[in-house]
Amino acid sequence: MKRTKVVDALKSTDYGKEIVVKGWARSHRSSKAVDFIALNDGSTIKNLQVVVDPSAVDAEELKSITTGACIGVEGTLVESQGKGQTVEVQAKKIVIYGLCPNDYPMQKKGQSFEYMRQFAHMRLRTNTFGAVFRIRHNMAIAIHKYFHDHGFYYFNTPLITASDAEGAGEMFQVTTLDLDRVAKEGQVDYSKDFFGKKTNLTVSGQLEGELGATALGAIYTFGPTFRAENSNTPRHLAEFWMIEPEIAFMDKDELMDLEEDFIKYCVQWALDNCMDDLEFLNKMIDKTLLDTLHSVVKESFVRLPYTEGIKILEQAVKDGHKFENPVTGWGMDLNSEHERYLVEQHFKKPVIMTDYPSEIKAFYMKKNPDGKTMQGTDVLFPRIGEIIGGSVREESYEKLLDEIEKRHMKESTYSWYLDTRKYGSCPHAGFGLGFERLILFVTGMQNIRDVIPFPRTPKNAEF
Ligand code: 4AD
Ligand code: MG
């Protein structure tokens, strides 16, 4: 008999039908007359109750089905008398695929996320992580759908590259050199390395994305990116996924419209397609989650020039607000604490901060006529801080080259990039959304390590 998924069985009203369901026991309770097994197969947050008449199956086998065991059940779908579910399965036959010994790390309910991170390979089988990763999947679908429907092409950029897209030097090197030998003999011969070149894992697909946009009109990337920054925070990963749309002929106002429309679309998609999981997270993780998601799709984001933002922060200090990181005035780089103050306490809605000082931002951003600020458009979100980093790009060959030289970047590494400005240069703009930061926001989870199946952080790369 073909397997019925739990999600479909729970929706069915085909009472009396014989079905086969398969999955993992979330719990097993025995009463005098019957046993109850809560079965979950990952297709939904909800469990299907399996009712077993102990006289109908082998008593020892039945007893051996503990939390985490994998089983198949053949039985009849019946209307449930119990609270909290409309259907259940009256078991006729149970097959055990895999028993689960007592040392199963996910056996106890209510373990801390920190504890579960030690078992990242096993935590996927818990309710919370099931919900988070179903939502993560749905967000990926929403992203592809949004861009496809708006005429963007999905464009794949390389993960191994010789350039530093952000010019910040935070790269993992890729090498075929025998590092043990290098350590011993102290020599580095790059001619024996990856095709004789010094290469690294990409920090962003943007530069190649710009090549795509200036040929196809509008593209987006969606792939892993790597940062060798040693930041041990709840918002940074060494390997994270980024979505980077890049659009020819787009100006700053249009870019902000796109950022706002896109992010609202993703949040609305979650509300439309993931309600069971969101309700679970709203109950278990963050009681304000659904309200926050609803308000983000309804409200207009504030558009705030950096200079105004700094004045607000300075005023907050004067009014007695204590920041851990000092507010040092115009020219300072904002810390997530400052960003969150503006969003959560001052405006109480998302903020698009614009026109940052050029010095604290990347080399490719287009300068304003004042020569001091540039046309950046970062989106700051409640609980997250920066969720999107974006800008209009400098389209003048001379100005871009000048910036590359000023920052002592190696011009020869960027010659291909400069060609976009040399041959038929066009005004264009784009942004990068940190996928895990979006998932953090949508799920209400607190730590970025808990929204990617296998987190890579400075101290964690085993599984
Ligand atoms: O602001 P960032 O560094 O911008 C870029 O990489 C640009 N090339 C994007 C573009 O314009 N195409 O990163 C963009 C976003 C951030 O706003 C943040 O959401 C996320 O990527 N991000 C990280 N997420 C997790 N861990 C990290 N270490 C991250 N660094 C950036
Ligand atoms: Mg940024």
Image (cartoon, helix red, strand yellow):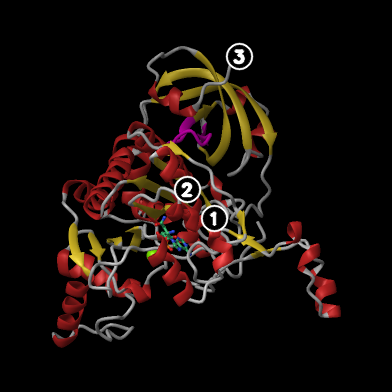
Q: Which of marks 3 and 2 is nearer the N terminus?
A: 3
> Residue 367 versus residue 29: which sits nearer the camera?
367
Label 2 neighbour load within 10 Å: few <14, some 14-19, many 20+: some
Crowd class of label 3 (few under 14; some 14 to 19; many from 20; radius 10 Å): few
Is 333 drawn above or below residue 34 in the view shown? below
Alpha carbon of mark 1 to alpha carbon of mark 3: how far? 59 Å
Region of the chain picked out in magenta, as a range:
35-49
Mark 2 and mark 1: Cα distance apart in space: 9 Å
Mark 2 lies on a secondary structure that is helix
Left or right relative to 9: residue 273: left
Report the amino acid beneath label 3: Met
Q: Are marks 1 and 3 in contact (CB under 8 Å)?
A: no
Query: 97 or 146: nearer the eye?
Result: 146
Q: Which amino acid does label 1 sit on?
A: Trp
N-terminal label among 2 and 1: 2
**What residue is shown with label 1?**
416
Q: Distance between the residues labelled 3 and 2?
A: 53 Å
Q: Can residue 111 be seen in this view?
A: no
For the residues bearing labels 2 and 1, Cβ distance under 8 angstroms: yes
Residue 348: x and y in percent read 17, 63
Residue 164 visible? The answer is yes
- Which residue shows up at 53% across the image and 43% down it? 156
Q: Name the residue under label 2.
A: 211
User: Closer to the observer: label 1 or label 3?
Assistant: 1
Q: Residue 1 carries which label?
A: 3
Number of disc labels: 3
